[in-house]
């Protein structure tokens, strides 16, 4: 798969590409002929950020770590 870094493109072009709706097309034209076609897709689904462990959970993890270290030494 080829990749285009939007940060390397002029701002107007990057905005055009990121503003495509799902199914909307952009024709790439060179010397009056069609050189390619881009089709907008659904934005990627972002994963929900992992929950921060509570103080209770952090203490439990630390206690397991400390016990494991004491067992080894």
Image: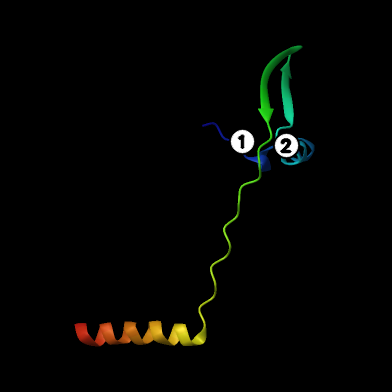
Quadrant placement of the C terminus: bottom left
* Label drawn at residue 72: none
Q: Secondary structure at mark 2?
A: helix
Residue 4 numbered mark, or none? 1
Q: Do we see residue 73 in this rendering?
A: no
Residue at image point 67% right, 23% down? 37
Circle 1 Cα neighbour tier, 10 Å, few/some/many (<14 / 14–19 / ≥20): few
**Label 1 residue SS:** loop
**Residues tagged 1 and 2 counted as in contact (Cβ below 8 A):** yes
Identify the colour scheme used.
rainbow
Would you say 15 lies left or right of 3 here?
right
Residue 11: image location, x then y, percent: 77, 40
Q: Is residue 45 left or right of residue 27?
A: left
Q: Give coordinates of residue 66: x percent, y percent.
A: 32, 86
Residue nearest the observer in this picture, 17 or 53 = 53
Nearest the viewer among 49 and 16 is 49
- Quarter of the image for residue 2 reads top right
Residue picked out by circle 2? 17
Q: Residue at x 66, y 37 (%)?
A: 41
Say above or below: 33 vs 46: above
**Rendering coords of residue 18 (x, y %):** 72, 41
Query: Would residue 33 be seen by someone viewing this image from the given angle?
Result: yes
**In which quadrant of the rendered view does residue 13 lie?**
top right
* Mark with earlier residue (1, 2): 1
Q: Position of residue 35 (x, y in %)?
A: 67, 17
Of circles 1 and 2, which is in front?
2
Q: Quadrant of residue 48?
A: bottom right
Report the Cα–Cα distance between label 1 and label 2.
11 Å
Q: Nearer the viewer, residue 30 or 21?
A: 21
């Amino acid at each position: 798969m080829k990749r285009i870094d939007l940060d390397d493109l002029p701002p107007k072009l990057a905005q055009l590409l990121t503003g495509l709706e799902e199914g909307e097309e952009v024709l790439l034209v060179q010397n009056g002929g069609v050189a390619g076609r881009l089709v907008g897709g659904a934005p990627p689904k972002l994963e929900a950020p992992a929950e921060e462990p509570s103080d209770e959970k952090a203490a439990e993890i630390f206690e397991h770590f400390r016990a494991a270290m004491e067992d080894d030494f």
